[in-house]
Structure formats: structure tokens, C-alpha cells
Amino acid sequence: MANWDSVACAEQTLERPNIVLILADDLGYSDLGCFGSEIETPRLDHLADQGLRMTQLYNAARCCSTRASLLTGLYPHQAGVGAMSVDNHKPGYRGFLTNRAVCVASLLRETGYQTFMAGKWHLRGKGNQACTPTNHGFDEFFGHFKAYASYYRSDLFERLPAGRTKRQYQPEKFYATDAITDHALDFIEMSQQKKDPFFLYVAYNAPHFPLQAPREEIEKELATYSKGWDRIRTARLGKLKAQGLVPPNTVLSERGHVTAVPERNADSPYYDREIPAWDDLSAVRQEDLATRMATYAAMVRIMDANIGRLVDCLENQSCLDNTLIVFLSDNGACAEWDPFGFDNNPYPSNRLYRGDDLAKMGGPRTFHSYGTGWANACNSPFRLYKHYNHEGGISSPTIVHWPKGMARRGEVDRTPTHVIDLAPTFLELAKATYPNDSPHLHPLAGESLLDVWRGESKRSRTLFFEHEGNRAVRSGKWKLVWINYRKRWELYDIEVDRTESKDRGSEFPEIVAALEKLWLKWASENFVELQRVKQPASGMPKIYYW
């Protein structure tokens, strides 16, 4: 470890590092240049070159569930956010952080850390006005409380505590990714007024739908995506192999057939049709889809540039060397709801854009997703997407950068870990104590990652997952996984088949039985309902964007 006593930050001596946690929203596993993408992400690539890429850090398959685990060190059901934001009046499904969980910001603040958040909270539930960042340990907050929000609507963003003045933007000049960064920079500068270290949580809503970006940025990517998702998938796999992120014998998962269900109904809202081959689509459909993906890619590039602004600020404040930066995504790429995406809010059917309409895509008065076909490409080479517990749903591209505290540079770590491990890691770095003796709080489910980051240990662990009836348990090389509408277990040897192509369940029924027993025990102890907890119709978000 680093000699913390000698670390200087803005001419101040600190014993503990600053911590900057950066979360992307719905970013696919292979959407960064340093994880195989054609999208240009030079600032994140540089952090990876000077730090560590973690290829098997798992998330909780969904925006709010991952956020609950990330900030508490608990499985999402323990924290009360096992599903989405509707309160089902079941302990694991309240839709907001309950009093059985404590936010890491609160514990860091108790040890003297300054605590700041900019971005998407998504842990307040429906109507729970008290569950805000500033009531969970953050000194300052700028952001929004929605599942998603227009990138052009400044009025959807709030500044807390009450009475704080948020930045003012000229009409047509507000863009959420830029504004989140603006306020994060304000917080970094604010932190330098004190000698205490700081914890900054930057939760971008990019690249979550609605797909919105400046037109000039969209046009930079149109030629790239006119090649289509099949060629993009093949190119990404080649780059992943060249970067040493997947074994040379890795093959792409099949093109999206695994999520097809007989019909759309109340019990299977996440249906999609077979993803067609790109070359089988009409030229008009290809142009529509290329524009959607070009918009998405522009959003990723803009986020990368803003992360560069954060890094530059840290360097200008002489803080970068002793600042731990952790970057990850909250879940896999978003396939909602059709191979061709959807248009308008909330979630109606897709329509074909052509001619002059294409030039409007991505603007302030538009609302689009990019659909299953592109999500399949963005999660290359894995199966499935957000919502599911297959690798495409729960694998986060993760970068760790800490010059003074971590000697590994440009390395890849394949240790299976989980977002529940980040809060315990931050607590160890802060020399903070988790209140394990509290009768009201759940004990930490996660483990510190410091030994992993130092390359000292390759621990064997058992990790558990559940979301919307989808289940999984990972133990050593084996992963048992269940899709809610298929209602049966699949078994994979992740060490040799991370694309989950060959179900080994019939060969090893004893392993299936043993892992199922472990999962059922975990579920019974962690407020997981064996029958899928449905979101009532009133839970469908109704948010106006223009």
C-alpha cells in the first residue's frame, strides 16, 4: 500500500484518500474503448492504462437495485430495493432505502469525510420524500430523483440542501451530463476549503434513454453504425480478444434468440422478437437504427469527455495522485422493448423514422431507445441484458485508478466480485467502522477489495442474484442461472464459457441441486420472494419531458 502520511493534496497532508465513485447508467459491457468498443473514450481508456480493469465485477441487473447495493454494501433486497421504486409493502421490495441499511456516505462523514453527490439518486421510491442523498449522509447534492429524465430539462434537477443555489444555464444550453459535471467540479473545489478528504459520487444518467445528444455529435457516428450490429459485434469481439479481456477461443453468443417469448402479456413485459440479421433489414430501417445507435455513442463520448474534466480538476487541485477513482456501469445494456427500440414516453411501440424526421432524432422534444439489436451488440460477447442475471445483464465494465495506493498499471483482474464490495472497501480506506453490533442494521454482505486490487488474493466466493424473478448464483467457476419466464435452471462453467453457450445442467445434476439449495437459503434469509413481485400498473412512470 501507499505511504498515506506522505500524500499531499492542495498543500494539505492527508492520511486517507479522496474517493470518486463514477456510475454510468445502462452502459453495455463492451461500450468503452478499453473494453472493446469502437466508441472513442480516450479519458476512460487512459485511466484504465494507468490503473486496473476488472472484468468480473457484477451488478444487481437494474438501476435502483445496483445503487442500493453500491451505497450500502448489502444485497438490494436487504436494503429494501429488490425490484423498482413502487412500494410493495414487503421488506425486500419497499422501493427506497429502509432503516435496516446505512448509506456509506453517512459512515464516511462520521469519520470526517466531506461527502458530495451529483447525478441520479433513484432510491426515493414513490412518494418517500425523506429518502434523499442529504438525509443519507451527503453534505451536498445536485441531480434528479427519476428513473430517467430529459437531458435538456434543467427543471427536473434539484439542488440540496434546501436553499442551495444551483447553477443557472441559458436556454438551450443545459445538457444533463455537462451539468452533473459542472456541479461535481464545484464540489471538488468546495472540498479544498477544508483539510478533510472527500467522497464524491457522480451518477450520470448517460447513456440511459431517452437517447438525446447534440446533432453535430450524432452525425460523427452515423457512418460507423450504418455497418450494422452484426459487424459491430464481430469487431468488438476481435478487440476484446486483442486486449486480453476474453480468451482467444471466445465465440459470440447467438443473436438474441434467447429472449423471445410467445406473446406480450402482463406476465412477460420484457418480450422481444428474434433479432434479425442487419443485412435483412430495409435501407430505411437501417438508417433509423444507425441514427439511434449514433446518438447513444455520442452520449458515451460526451460522458467520457466530462470524466476528463473531473480528472483535470483533480490534477489542477493536486489531488489526483491520492484520489481513488472507481468507474462502473449500473447494469448491462438496455434492450427495452423491441429489436428496433421504442419512441415516446412511457414505452409505447416503435415507429420508423425516415427522411426529415431523422434529423430530429436526439433533440430536446424527442424520446427514443435503441432496442434489443443494439443492446445485444453493446453487451458483446455476452447473453441477455439489463433485467436478467445472465452475464449481459450483470457484468459491469469497471476501472480502478489510484496512483498512490495501487501499483498495478494497465492490468486486468478477473476475480469475481460484486458491487456490494465497494462500500466495505471505502470504509476500510476511510478507517471507518461499520456498526455490526446495531440490532437494526443488516451486517455487511460485501467484502473489501483492497487485497484484490493489490493482486494478493484470488478468493473463492459465492455470489447471489435476483431481479424480477430472474435468479443466479455464482460459486467458483460454476454459475447457476434462471430466466423468469422459462422457469428452469441452467448451469454454466464460466471459466471456459462466459458467453453461457453450453448448458451443463444435465451433465452435473448434483451441482445444480447443491447451488439451488444455496440460492434458496440465501433467498429465504434476504427477503427475496420466490414468486415474482409484480409492479402495479400505477407504477409505470409518467414523466413529461417537454
Image (cartoon, rainbow, N blue to C red):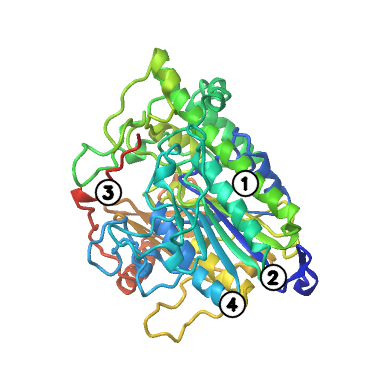
* x and y, in percent, of residue 220 in the image: 58, 24
**Label 2 or label 1, whichever comes before in sequence order:** 2
Q: Pointer 1: what residue?
A: 307
Q: Cα distance, mark 4 to mark 3?
A: 48 Å
In this view, the residue in front, 82 or 309, is 309
Comes first in the chain, label 3 or label 2: 2
Give the labeled residue for mark 3.
Answer: 486
Kindly identify the amino acid type of the residue bearing the numbered disc 4: Thr
Q: Position of residue 120 (x, y in %)?
A: 45, 52
Q: Name the mark nearer the viewer: 4 or 3.
A: 4
Q: Amino acid at mark 2?
A: Lys
Residue in the foreground of this view, choosing between 130 and 452: 130
Which residue bears the numbered disc 4?
111
Which is nearer the N-term, disc 4 or disc 1?
4
Q: Is residue 270 left or right of residue 24?
A: left
Q: Left or right? Give the position of 341 relative to 325.
A: left
Reading the image, the residue beneath label 2 is 195
